[in-house]
Amino acid sequence: MTVEVPRWQALWARWRHGVALLSFGAGIGSFLLIQRQERVAQALVFLLPLSWLLAFAEPALQRLAERKAALRLSPLLAGYLTQALHQESLFFTLPFFIATVTWNSSQTGFIVLMTALALVSIIDPLYYRHVLPRRALLWSFHAVAAFVTVLTAAPMLWQLTTTQSLLMALAMMGTLSLPVWWQLLRLPSGRRALLTAAAAVTLVWALWQLRAAIPPSTLRVTRIVVTDHVDPAQKEPGDALTRLPVSSLSNGLFVWSSIHAPRGLHERIEHRWLHNGTLVDVVPLDIAGGREAGYRAWSRKQSFGDDPRGAWEVRVATQSDQLIGVVRFRVD
């Protein structure tokens, strides 16, 4: 007996992987729009949290559909919808993180993890055999998708600082991880609820400790140099220096950086001066978003201690310790 496959199902099976490509393309397009016309990009990014809310409500919608025949959806359709939402969230936000990651840092691991999850969402044997049937793993995908969505959308939609956006994303991650722990912990109800809440709080705490490995998705360094002078009128640096003698430090050094941020965003960043891996100075700087080439700001260091020889680096970071960029030089 031959079972006729609905036309929509056949079309979706043929073209559903296009969702990932379209989402990735939309992410790239939105990233480019952010550099030219942030208002348009805000409208595009606003769609992402709305689509995630649909995924969050999926279990309730399924129960409603089971009670009302007119609303009944096949499990396959629900699976397709969930997969599409995960693809949209992961592939849409990936270009933002790729553009802002500091590759020679722990942030590379974050990009590798995001890319792996995005690929799992489009490989049907993995997604339908291992993710969709396991509620704990499925809700883990929901939690990660919501986390990266909030990190990307919040600074553009509400001009939240990177720290505020990170805290909001962590709160979302903790909330959506509750079903994960509930599924994993097979205990009596009272203890199960208590340990579920404790596990969610522990997860949020652990991610906060690892925040330096999370790229600030809407802040990026367009240029950073070490130089011996800056033109304050033109706000432009002198020649970039990578190796210099001790004698050239008598007049001090500047680190000049240009940081791109969304229009309307006001953020405090820090230039953190390190000598041979030890933090020796922190200079706070206030930046404003909107300039296509990035907001230009610099710090100056005049005191280098008794023996300044060795490896120096200046890390550009948010107040929540998320690394934006780094520049290195050596004193002989």
Image: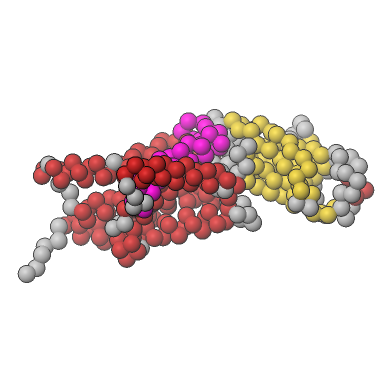
Determine the residue positioned at 24% across, 51% down.
78
Q: Considering depth in this image, is 98 or 177 the residue closer to the camera? A: 177
How many numbered discs, if any?
0
Q: Quadrant of residue 44?
A: top left
- In the image, residue 201 lies at what x, y percent? 47, 42
Q: Colour scheme used in the picture? A: secondary structure
- In the image, residue 321 lies at what x, y percent? 62, 42
- In the image, residue 150 lies at what x, y percent? 45, 40
- Residue 153 visible? The answer is no
Q: Considering depth in this image, is 302 or 68 the residue closer to the camera? A: 68
- Residue 275 visible? The answer is yes
Q: Quadrant of residue 229?
A: top right
- Quadrant showing the C terminus: bottom right
Q: Residue furthest left?
A: 1
Determine the residue positioned at 41% across, 60% down.
119
Determine the residue positioned at 34% across, 58% down.
131
Please report the bounds of the magenta region as a residue range: 155-184
Q: Quadrant of residue 319?
A: top right
Q: Is residue 249 above or below residue 43?
A: below
Residue 75 left/right relative to 196: left
Is-magenta flag for residue 71?
no
Q: Residue furthest right?
A: 247
Residue 317 left/right relative to 231: left
Residue 135 left/right relative to 99: left
- Quadrant showing the N terminus: bottom left
